[in-house]
């Protein structure tokens, strides 16, 4: 087509599918190819003019008897000269077209497809911010989250993601109970001291409280605090930010080191783990849920890309171990990250670093600000400020190759005030 009538692609044409089919049929007729060739091309024209989503059987049964005679008359009117008799042409073409059209029309209506299973509703049972439930009230065998609505919706500002998968809840509680009975210390009342950080509405708390009635919980959301106190009146709930808790004083009040279970908000995970390390003497072990990438950093070894402040500080006072992962669908609302469980067994009191935790953290952070530089260069500012020295054998090493014990030695040499008696 000349000039402005040209179209760049099939998406930009202004002619309908039927008009294009008629143009093709007219062109073939003008070339004198005859009605037989048009009959053979009829399925192709039909696929352009009349696409269908029906099943192959339905298309063959419904479309063939109705469209075949109409298409035969259309092709006759195009192919035969005006002087020809339409009934006579129909009589010649119709017996030929009817057997030809039924199978091709069924193929066009429903072409063969690869055998790919269709994703069911249970493939993605929970969507972000809402619950997708089937007619039975649950999808894929997973019970819907029993969370209060309205005023109790999870707060994004607090990073709230409530664990609602009963299978993971059972797995976490069973493992934690086993750790407490195996490694936990008993207090003045003869019971282990258990503390849950960020219990939310108590999905884990209810199970743990049944085994350890003297447990305590730390929760910052007043709405959740009210729910916990109403559902478990004997639970000792502290309405407080977990970053400001005096874990050492809390453990002293019970006469033993505490055992912590927590689903840590992702936005404060690093600060929360460092806060636990600062009170290592008050904690026997912690079983915490964190983002998978954070768990990888905590258990990283010297020389690896993930090795950094978290690994150096936590491994100096504890033995962390990554256990299993949890998908986002196990939470409500579902986060876009994968979570992991960390077992952090804190060392015995005699094995803990003999330096102040805050001083150790300061030195480690300065070292990793320039992780690839030699220590004598990366610590130059701190050396001049404190008028201290670092061990000669460590001057030409880099932060990413140091072991946790090496950071303790540097802190003791560089900051004499950090030493503990």
Image (tube, grey):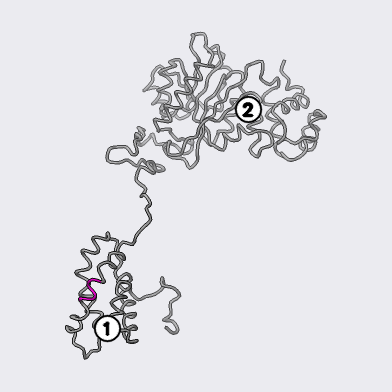
Furthest-left residue in this view: 87
Compute the Cα span from label 2 to label 1: 85 Å
Extent of the magenta region: 95-99
Question: In this picture, is 156 found above or below 344?
Answer: below
Q: Which residue is mark 1?
A: 78
Give residue 127's quadrant in the image: top left
Crowd class of label 2 (few under 14; some 14 to 19; many from 20; radius 10 Å): many
| Residue that label 2 marks | 314
Tag 1 secondary structure: helix
Q: Mark 2 touching mark 1, by CB under 8 A?
A: no
Instruction: In the displayed orientation, state which residue is furthest to the bottom.
Output: 83
Type of secondary structure dominating the magenta stretch: helix
Residue 388 percent coordinates (x, y): 81, 28
Q: Which disc, if any, is residue 134?
A: none
**x and y percent of residue 277 in the render?**
61, 25
Residue at the spot 55% in from the left edge and 34% down from the top edge: 268
At 34% from the left and 45% from the top, the residue drawn is 121
| Coordinates of residue 257 in the picture (x, y in percent) | 56, 16
Q: Is residue 411 left or right of residue 101?
A: right
Say which element carries label 2.
Answer: helix
Q: Quadrant of the N terminus?
A: bottom left
């Amino acid at each position: 087509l000349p000039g402005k009538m040209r179209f760049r692609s099939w998406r930009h044409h202004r002619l309908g599918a039927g008009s294009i089919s008629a143009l093709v049929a007219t062109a073939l007729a003008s070339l004198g190819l005859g009605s037989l060739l048009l009959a053979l091309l009829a399925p192709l024209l039909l696929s352009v003019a009349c696409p269908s989503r029906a099943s192959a059987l339905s298309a063959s049964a419904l479309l063939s008897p109705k469209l075949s005679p109409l298409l035969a008359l259309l092709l006759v009117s195009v192919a035969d000269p005006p002087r020809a008799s339409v009934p006579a042409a129909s009589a010649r073409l119709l017996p030929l077209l009817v057997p030809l059209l039924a199978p091709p029309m069924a193929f066009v209506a429903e072409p063969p497809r690869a055998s790919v299973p269709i994703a069911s509703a249970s493939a993605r049972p929970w969507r972000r911010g809402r619950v997708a439930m089937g007619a039975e009230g649950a999808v894929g065998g997973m019970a819907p989250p029993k969370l209060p609505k309205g005023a109790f919706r999870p707060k994004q500002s607090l990073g709230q993601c409530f664990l609602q998968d009963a299978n993971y809840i059972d797995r976490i509680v069973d493992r934690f109970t086993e750790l407490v009975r195996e490694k936990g210390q008993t207090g003045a009342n003869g019971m282990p001291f258990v503390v849950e950080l960020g219990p939310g509405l108590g999905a884990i708390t209810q199970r743990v409280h049944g085994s350890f009635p003297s447990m305590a919980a730390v929760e910052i959301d007043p709405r959740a605090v009210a729910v916990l106190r109403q559902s478990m009146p004997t639970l000792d709930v502290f309405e407080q930010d977990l970053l400001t808790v005096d874990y050492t004083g809390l453990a002293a009040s019970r006469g033993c080191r505490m055992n912590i279970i927590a689903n840590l908000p992702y936005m404060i995970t690093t600060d929360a783990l460092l806060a636990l390390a600062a009170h290592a003497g008050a904690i026997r072990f912690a079983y915490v849920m964190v983002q998978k990438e954070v768990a990888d950093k905590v258990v990283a070894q010297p020389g690896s890309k993930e090795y950094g402040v978290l690994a150096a500080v936590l491994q100096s006072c504890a033995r962390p171990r990554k256990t299993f992962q949890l998908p986002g669908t196990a939470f409500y609302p579902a986060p876009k990250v994968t979570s992991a469980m960390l077992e952090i067994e804190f060392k015995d009191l005699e094995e803990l670093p003999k330096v102040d935790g805050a001083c150790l953290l300061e030195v480690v952070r300065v070292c990793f600000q320039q992780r690839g530089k030699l220590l004598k260069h990366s610590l130059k500012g701190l050396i001049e400020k404190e008028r201290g020295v670092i061990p000669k054998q460590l001057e030409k090493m880099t932060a990413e190759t140091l072991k946790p014990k090496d950071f303790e030695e540097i802190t003791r040499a560089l900051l004499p005030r950090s030493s503990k008696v």
